[in-house]
């Protein structure tokens, strides 16, 4: 499995002081340990509800987020009509 570390940091601009932290500000500081699966399995195409977008390929696998197994879905999409 590939090991990825996802980190999002705040921008460099000045901000006005707030009494409480917003949800968006709290999410920006989240760090997750993610392991993407090396092996995935191709399945029947999943439909998308986006107008003008078609699914070309759908793969599934099992990833680990913070040590817990979770479903991993990879879709190849094509835009245009």
Image: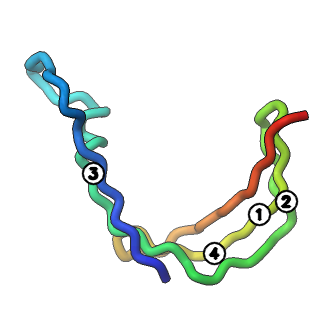
Give residue 68's mark.
none
| Residue visible at 73% across and 69% down in the picture | 59
The residue at which mark 1 appears reads as 58
Q: The C terminus lies in which quarter of the figure?
A: top right
Marks 1 and 2 close (CB-CB < 8 Å): yes
- Circle 4: element type: strand
From the image, tell me which residue sits under label 4: 61
| Residue 12 x/y as whole percent | 19, 32
User: How many numbered dots are placed on residues in this image?
Assistant: 4
| Nearer-N-terminus badge (2/4) | 2
Q: Earlier in the sequence, mark 3 or mark 4?
A: 3
Q: Quadrant of residue 37?
A: bottom right
Say if 32 sits above or below 62 in the image: above
How many residues crowd around disc 3 within 10 Å: few (fewer than 14), some, or many (20 or more)? few
Left or right, 75 with reference to 69: right
Dot 1 falls on a residue whose secondary structure is strand
Q: Secondary structure at mark 3?
A: loop
Q: Circle 2 is placed at which residue position?
A: 45
Where residue 28 sits, quadrant-wise, is: top left
Query: x%, y% of residue 45?
Result: 85, 59
CA separation, marks 1 and 3?
A: 28 Å
Residue 68 vertical position relative to residue 38 in the rendered view, above or below: above
Q: Which numbered dot is residue 30?
A: 3
Could you tell me how far apart the alpha carbons at marks 1 and 2 are, in whole angstroms? 5 Å
Give the distance between the C-alpha atoms of the residues marked 3 and 2, in whole angstroms: 32 Å
Instruction: Using residue 1 as the reference point, say whether residue 65 is left or right of it.
Output: left
Disc on the earlier residue, 3 or 2: 3
The reply, left or right, for residue 46 in relation to residue 2 is: right
Q: CA distance from mark 3 to mark 4?
A: 24 Å
């Amino acid at each position: 499995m590939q090991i990825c570390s996802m980190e999002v940091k705040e921008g460099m601009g000045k901000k006005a002081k707030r009494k409480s932290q917003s949800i968006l500000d709290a999410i920006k500081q989240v760090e997750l340990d993610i392991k993407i699966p090396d092996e995935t399995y191709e399945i029947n195409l999943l439909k998308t509800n986006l107008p003008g977008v078609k699914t070309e390929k759908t793969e599934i696998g099992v990833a680990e987020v913070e040590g817990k197994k979770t479903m991993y879905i990879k879709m190849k999409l094509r835009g245009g009509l």
